[in-house]
Image (cartoon, rainbow, N blue to C red):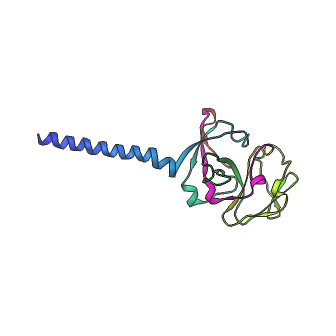
Amino acid sequence: MKQEKMSAKRIAAELAIYVVILLVCIFIVPRYVIQRTLVDGESMEATLQDKDNLLVDKCVFKLTGIDRFDIVVFYPFGKEDDPEDYFIKRIIGLPGETIQIKGEDIYINGEILEEHYGKDPIDDAGVASDPITLGEDEYFVLGDNREISRDSREFGAVNIKDIAGHAVFRMYPFGSFGPLTNK
């Protein structure tokens, strides 16, 4: 009888542990650690395609920072306005830098940025036709498909508080399965 009580208590304890783990996986991990995000549109072609499924780091990037050319998920008009309206773009300008687009060239602090992500030349510099100096918590983002992308040329700098995470891994399509790199 004692053995049965111990066994029942052990089963109940194990079950409670599994329930806690399940709840953490369902509620805590997607909200604060990592989440699946769907690419909606063609603004990041040729790097990302419409309907690609990505994993987005929501935690580590806050500790390690964001680097030039990282792909980020953010809310261009603030998360409070519409939490479903997120964009996926590439970091071009970092805090404290001055950005300007002249013709097809992107200038960072007066020097031409060497990059190969843009699918097409830039036709419209938008607000970046004049120099923009980024604040200490601001980033300048561009889509890789420069002809159709809605990005910082339209809505200006993105504040760090509006960045939800750093896209780190493509889960689908399976033919493109793997980490997203800046190389």
Task: Indicate whether residue 175 is drawn in magenta.
Answer: no
* On screen, residue 118 above or below 93: above
Which sits in the foreground, 84 or 110? 84
Q: Can residue 183 be seen by looking at this rendering?
A: no
Query: Going 54% across and 55% down the picture, which residue do you hit?
Result: 59
Counting the numbered discs, the total is 0
Q: Quadrant of the N terminus?
A: top left
Percent x, y for residue 63?
Answer: 56, 60
- Quadrant of residue 163 within the rendered picture: bottom right
Percent x, y for residue 116?
Answer: 77, 48
Taking 131 as reference, is 18 left or right? left
Taking 161 as reference, is 11 left or right? left
Q: Going by the picture, which residue comes out furthest to the right?
A: 103
Query: Going 27% across and 45% down the picture, which residue do you hit?
Result: 13
Q: Going by the picture, which residue comes out furthest to the front?
A: 81
* On screen, residue 155 above or below 18: below
Q: Which region is colored magenta?
A: 147-174
Query: Going 46% across and 49% down the picture, which residue do you hit?
Result: 28
Percent x, y for residue 29?
Answer: 48, 48
Percent x, y for residue 20?
Answer: 36, 47
Task: Indicate whether residue 161 is drawn in magenta.
Answer: yes
* On screen, residue 95 above or below 141: below
Taking 98 as reference, is 166 left or right? left
* On screen, residue 38 above or below 151: above
